[in-house]
Amino acid sequence: MAKEKKMAVCRYCGAEIAANAKACPQCGGKQKKPTYKRWWFVVLAVIILLGAIGSVAGGSGEQNPPAGSAVNSSAGVQPGPSTESAPEEIVYTAYSVFELMQDLEQNALKASEKYKDQFVELTGALSVIDSSGAYISIRPQEEPFAIVGVTCYLKSEDQKAKVMELSVDDTVVVRGKIKEVGEVLGYSLDIDEIVSAG
């Protein structure tokens, strides 16, 4: 049985010709592949499609500035005009470390519900200064031999510089957000500011 040839239609005269013919035997018209069937057109279409997907996916994450990028007007740099509303001002609730430790001893679950993720201003006595500059620990001023207290994590070189001036047993006031509460390790806090020390 003879192998059937694939047939096509001439683009110019409409005569039936072999699919792989480069020119029409009837009219002599050259038979070029349509642009959309050429390899370079397919590659170009894929690149354009990937670029469009990337710009849609990547563009959604750029509308909000990253955390911590707000301009600090107290440093002498004035923020420019903004069409967005100003971020909410953080209000710190003042406590002594003694209050936190009493609540923790009486009911750790209740203390966790009360203090976790709260912005606080804590007053206590400095008990540990980490040698690598990662954290300090503060204890109740009323309990000089307390083992458990509040571990405060430093986040900036300015904070480290302030800690360099301190000594164990100095009274310190810190502001920040309580991240963890536990009956064994006490509290952990991310420092936003060391308000006063001495």
Image: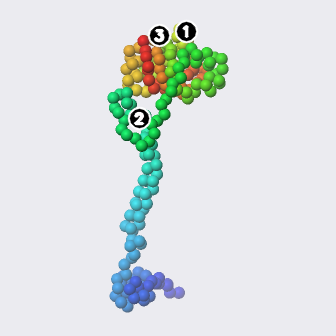
- Residues at badges 2 and 3 in contact (C-beta under 8 Å)? no
Of badges 2 and 1, nearer the viewer stands 2
**Which of these two is toward me, 50 or 190?**
190
Q: Is residue 158 above or below residue 49?
A: above
Residue 47 left/right relative to 97: left
Q: Which residue is mark 2?
A: 70
Q: Amino acid at mark 3?
A: Asp
Residue 158: x percent and y percent?
Answer: 38, 24
Mark toward the viewer: 1 or 3: 1
- Could you tell me residue 67's position as x and y percent? 45, 36
Instruction: Work out whether residue 134 can be spotted.
Output: no
Q: Return the residue nearer the eye: 195 or 34.
A: 195
**How many C-alpha atoms fall within 10 Å of the one at disc 2: few (<14), some, or many (≥20)?**
few
Checking the image for residue 142, the label placed there is 1
Against 11, residue 124 (above or below) is above
The kind of secondary structure element at disc 3 is loop
Residue at the image position 42 percent from the left and 89 percent from the top: 15
Spatial separation of the CA atoms under disc 2 and disc 3: 34 Å
- Judged from the image, the secondary structure of the residue bearing numbered disc 1 is loop
Mark pair 1, 3: CA separation: 11 Å
Q: Disc 1 residue type?
A: Glu
Query: Answer yes or no: do the residues labelled 1 and 3 have beta carbons within 8 Å?
Result: no
The kind of residue on which mark 2 rests is Ala
Q: Secondary structure at mark 2?
A: loop
Quadrant for residue 145, please give it: top right
Mark sitting earlier along the chain (1/3)? 1
Question: On the image, numbered disc 3 is attached to which residue?
Answer: 169
